[in-house]
Amino acid sequence: MSWALAAGDQDQRSPLRGIRVLDFSTLLPGPYATQILADLGADVVKLESPRGDEARRFANGMYAVANRNKRAVVADLTNDDERAATLALAAEADVVVEGFRPGVVDRLGVGYEDVRKVRPDVIYCSITGFGQNGPNRDKPGHDISYLAASGGLAYSAHWQQGPRRSGVPIADLAGASFATIAILAALRERDRDGSGCHLDVSIADATMAFASPRGGPSFSVGDEERLSVYPTNDLFAAADGAVLAVAAVEEKFWAALRSILAEYEPELADHRFDDEGGRRRHGDELQALLGRAFRRRDAAEWEQAFAASDVSVERVLSLAEAAHGPQARSRGVVATLGGEEQVVFPVLRDGSVMGSFRSPAPAHGQHSEGLFGGPGRDA
């Protein structure tokens, strides 16, 4: 059994080259966190049960996006021999990530204390819905559950609507983001003093942190006050049905937008919309006027009209439109491998994207033979 990488699997410039990660997690929060680490050069081994990650059976392609650049092995952790083989892998890992409910890994014999016996300086990260303690620790949930429980659904993004869920899994990605940051911070601390630790990441806590800028200090901003929502910061349909995102929050953006739209709805020039207070007091009327104005022309005509002005108006694009557009192309954040396209870690370092796309998401047990010394299981 060996953790050795095949030649050429890592770029010498990868910032996490040499870091080994053993990932027990499934679905999105844990795999997305370890995918970020893999994009940055860590060697991530995904360990799955004989049944496999449930995300493999999802039709939306989430598994492929959250598990690129990884290797995959299969182990039945209720089997003594396979548990022992798993702990042998853990003994060579810098980081272990798990996403079971609290207490499950301990019962399986691969919890923090079990791994620490074979790797005392391990960074062990547990990602759960509500954390390892508290009255909610054993409750089940998914993204919308954690949004609801954390205050993440308390604020509306629209002037005339109540709270709505985003189509992007904000809670899951918040948990993944904080897990990744915590792992990197713990690795840096270990570089200084040689210590390992157990990281307890609650998805609900992470989501509450994401929601807190809307709530202000002491969580004093209520959604009924509409202090974080602007009638000029919303979505409006053009004549052809395309949707435009308008972000006229600061006075300079409102002035530029107003100067163009008033040609179609002269009432927008009325003094009651001159300052933010007036725009809020008359927000319902203002939204109606803006809606009528935008419905006068097609989206492409509006884009042409706004191109020469400093106005923050963007057409709402599909993911494919954005990924294939000139901005993404110029940034180089979309990588292609074997005909498959993915958005890699999208930060540029000295002009080049830091993330890489070295291998597609692995088949179930694809690397079991090389790492466990036995045949892999079929997907």
Image (tube, grey):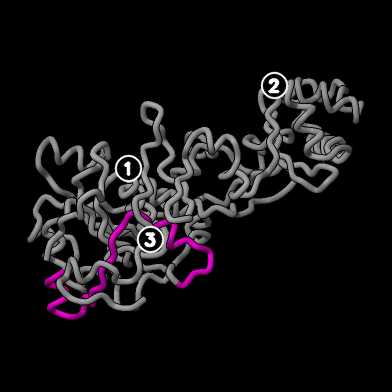
Amino acid type, mark 1 = Ile
**Of the two numbered discs 3 and 1 in the rendering, the one whose residue sits closer to the viewer:** 3
Task: Mark 1 vs mark 2: give the one in front.
Answer: 2
Mark 3 vs mark 2: give the one in front. Answer: 3
Q: Residue at x 63, y 43 (%)?
A: 223
Residue 373, placed above or below residue 28: below
* 67 inside magenta stretch: yes
Q: Which badge, 1 or 2, comes first in the chain's sequence?
A: 1
Residue that label 3 marks = 361
SS of the residue under disc 3: loop
Circle 1 SS class: helix
Q: Which mark is residue 181?
A: 1
Indicate left or right for 21 with 373 as reference. right
Asked if residue 84 is among those painted magenta in the image, a careful observer would answer yes
Residue 240 vs residue 226, the one in the foreground: 240
Instruction: Please state if 269 lies on the left or on the right of 25 as rendered.
Output: right
Contact between marks 3 and 2 (CB within 8 A): the answer is no
Can you give x and y, in whole percent of width and height, for residue 220 in the image?
Answer: 54, 37
- Give the Cα separation between the discs numbered 1 and 2: 35 Å
Which range of residues does the magenta coloring cover?
A: 57-85
Label 2 Cα crowd, 10 Å radius (few <14 / some 14-19 / many 20+): few
Rendered position, 325 above or below 47: above
- To which residue does mark 2 refer? 310
* Amino acid type shown at disc 3: Ala
Which residue is found at the position 71% from the left and 25% from the top?
311
